Each structure stands twice: as C-alpha cells, then as structure tokens.
Amino acid sequence: MTPAELDALRLSLSVALRSVLASLPFAVAIAWLLSRRTLRGRLILDALVHLPLVLPPVVVGYLLLLLFGARGPIGSWLDERFGVQLVFTSAGAALATAVMTFPLMVRAIRISLEAVDPGLEDAARTLGAGPWDRFFTITLPLMAPGVLAGAVTAFAAGLGQFGVVITFVSNIPGETRTLPLALYTALQTPGGDALAARLAAISFSLGLAGLVAAELIARRLHRLLGR
C-alpha cells in the first residue's frame, strides 16, 4: 500500500472509532428513554433520532455546517470559549460520522433493551437495588449484545461515510480524506483506476468484516447470557 492509501485507511479507522466512542453513551441513554419511559413528544424524539437515515447525507452535512461552522451558533461558541474548530478537521469528520451512524446504534440497543424482562428490574428494586444498581448489574449486561452489535455496525458504517463528510469537512489529504473520499479522488484523477480498485477492495473488506464481527459478537453474548 502507498503512503496515501495508508493515510486514508488510518484516518478512516480513527474517525469511525472516535465517532462510536463519542456517541455510544448517548445512544444507550436515548434507547433507554425510548424503551423505558413514557415521554411527551416521544414520537418526535424517535423521528429526530432516525432522521439521518432518511435525509440525504449532503443535507445533514449542510445542517452541521450551519450549526458547527465558524459562524454557526455552536461552532462559534466552541471556538470562542475553548478554541475548538470542527470544520475541515478530523474531529469534524468524526462528528459527521457519528451523526449518520447514531440511529443504527440506537435501533440495535433499543431492540436488545426491549427484550430484557422488566420483571427482573422490578425484582431487584424490591430487594433494595437503586436505579443505577439495577441498570449496571441487570439491564446493561442483558442488553450488552445489542450495545456491542450496534457499536460494531456503526463502526463499519462509519468507514463508508462520504456525502456528509465531504460537505462538512471537505477533502483534505491527511486530515479529512478518509477511504471513500480517497476513492472519489482517485476516480477523478487520470490513471487512478488501479488505486480506486484497491481502495474499493479495502472498503469492501472492512465493511464485510465489521458486519460479520457484529453478528458473531451478538451470537456469542446471547450464548453466554443463555438467551
């Protein structure tokens, strides 16, 4: 592999991993709210969470620009208060990737959480277990297959994000040029067909490996938990 290919691969893995680590706690919290709480406006919250699945990625990237750009309400505040800039950075690429893959995690975690018998939590409550004790000793272990499967699926999907990334953080070599963007660049370059084929093969292999890993992890945990 050439240095450019290695750079794109390293950046893709880094962006996907950072996006999952940053959004996983929020995905667990949102899935728990949607499954365990009767909220006013729950339907709206559910729709907002899953909106990135139906919006064009370019639209999501544009909305991120409006919010987190240098003149956006959140972006300008982050820059003034903490000196943090997200546009044209790998951190911004991770944010854009997290937004697009967040619904996948929430859906997997929610399905797993809804399979947990609430009676187990009620029994623990009658024995004196507090809310946090019940969550970390009963609910979280039982929903772990969904959490891990959702995280791995989101990681695999994050490796393939294109439209939202190029719209929000552009296509900067070594900073925001992930595998899909490197593939796009190769296709636009005369004589870049061989490089494009190699990048496509790498992307295909990583995506397939991620999906297989998610399924194997879920099956393994189901067996361990006797479900």
Image (cartoon, helix red, strand yellow):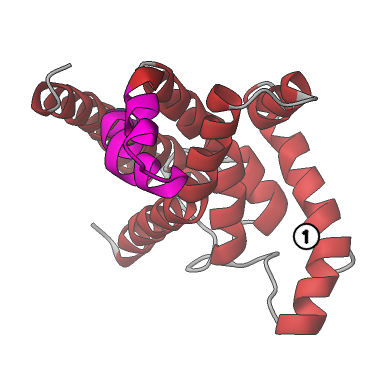
Q: Amino acid at mark 1?
A: Phe
Q: Residue at x 52, y 32 (%)?
A: 32
Q: Check the picture and name the quadrant holding the N terminus.
A: bottom left
Q: 61 and 141: which one is in front?
A: 141
Q: Position of residue 80 (x, y in %)?
A: 82, 82
Give the image quarter of residue 209: top left
Residue 80 visible: yes
Q: Check the picture and name the quadrant holding the C terminus.
A: top left
Q: Residue at x 12, y 20 (%)?
A: 226
Q: Residue 137 vs residue 50: left or right?
A: left
Give the image quarter of residue 55: top right
Q: Which residue is mark 1?
A: 68
Q: 110 and 68: which one is in front?
A: 110
> Quick check: is 146 in the magenta stretch?
yes
Q: Residue 139 vs residue 59: left or right?
A: left
Q: Residue at x 34, y 45 (%)?
A: 136
Q: Which residues are magenta?
A: 120-149
Mark 1: secondary structure: helix
Residue 179 visible: no
Q: 60 and 151: which one is in front?
A: 151
Q: Position of residue 90 (x, y in %)?
A: 54, 64
Q: Position of residue 156 (x, y in %)?
A: 36, 37
Q: Main secondary structure of the magenta part?
A: helix
Q: Residue at x 30, y 61 (%)?
A: 6
Q: How many marks?
A: 1
Q: 130 and 109: which one is in front?
A: 130
Q: Position of residue 46 (x, y in %)?
A: 67, 24
In the image, residue 136 above or below residue 54: below
In the image, residue 117 above or below residue 126: above
> Quick check: is 201 in the magenta stretch?
no
